[in-house]
Image: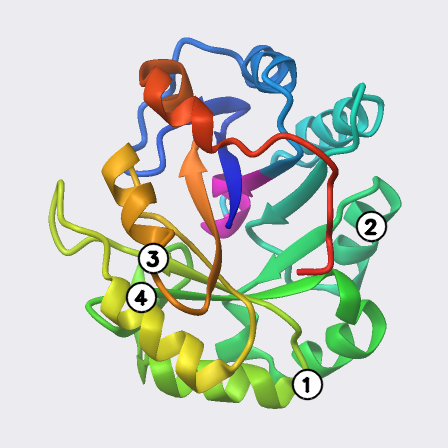
Amino acid sequence: MKVFPTLNLQHGRVVPTLGAHPHDVAPLELLSKLLGLGISRLAVVDVDAAHNTGHNRELIGRILKACSTAASPVCVQVAGGIRSSDQAQFFVDQGVSWLVVGTILHKSPLLVESLVARFQRHLTAAIDARGGEVHRSGWEDQAGLLARDLAAKIRAYGFKRLLFVDIPLEANASPDFGTARQISEAAKLPVLMGGSIISREHLDQAFAIAGLHGVLVDALLFLEDDRLLGHLNPGVCLDEH
């Protein structure tokens, strides 16, 4: 099971996955702490780009540079507002391992086909869902589609991996591992899960889910709960999934 500490960036600051209030720790300071722990994987989410209200590309570029010069290799996944070949190429040139695309799956099928043809080995398709129903545009609206149905379409596009972002129905809700199983069965692809996994107990439960290859966990939580550190699985960065 691969564990990805996740940096959510908004207006150049770190924000929690579930919430929008900036944290006191600066992004590069938090990254430095994570690198000191020996992480081999990292997820970065550009919240502004996801909502189409701006972007944090320069900051993400600095994060990618820091990861590329770390003592041990770090695989980095970037999500949020990847809606063109130029944007994808920018991050590939900066050394990204994986790029997540979500909203364009619903709005631009031709663009999806173009991106897959050009960047297939870097691409991860995202399904953002609440209670099994797909949401898009930074969780702002429903797509009128079930997560398991979209998972089948994603495989047909030619993606090699999939990210299920579980949007909790309410605060402190248990992760929707049922939908995770459905997505895995429909897509028949390596599946990552994030969004609602916020405790060591959630991580332990995730390890038992068949078809789940990795989880995204808010990086801030690793500073708040030392019990999570044992799940960081430091070591060689393998990017086959």
Q: Is residue 71 left or right of residue 224?
A: right
Q: Foreground mark, 2 or 3?
A: 3
- Distance in Å between CA atoms under marks 2 and 3: 33 Å
Q: Position of residue 219 (x, y in %)?
A: 45, 27
Q: Which residue is mark 2?
A: 92
Q: Foreground mark, 4 or 1?
A: 4
Secondary structure category for the residue under label 3: loop
The number of callouts visible is 4
Q: Dot 3, crowdedness within 10 Å: few (<14), some or many (≥20)?
A: few
Q: How is the image coloured?
A: rainbow
In the image, which disc is placed on residue 129?
4
- Distance in Å between CA atoms under marks 1 and 2: 21 Å
Magenta stretch, residue numbers: 43-52
Residue flagged by tag 1: what amino acid is it? Answer: Leu
- Distance in Å between CA atoms under marks 2 and 4: 27 Å
Secondary structure category for the residue under label 2: helix
Residue 201, quarter of picture: top left
- Distance in Å between CA atoms under marks 4 and 1: 23 Å
Q: Earlier in the sequence, mark 2 or mark 4?
A: 2
Quarter containing the C terminus: bottom right
Q: Is residue 179 left or right of residue 223?
A: left
- Distance in Å between CA atoms under marks 1 and 3: 37 Å
Q: What residue sits 27% from the left and 55% below the top?
A: 167
Q: Is residue 7 left or right of residue 66?
A: left
Say whether residue 123 is magenta: no
Residue flagged by tag 4: what amino acid is it? Answer: Ala
- Distance in Å between CA atoms under marks 3 and 4: 21 Å
Q: Which residue is mark 1?
A: 110
Q: Which residue is mark 3?
A: 208
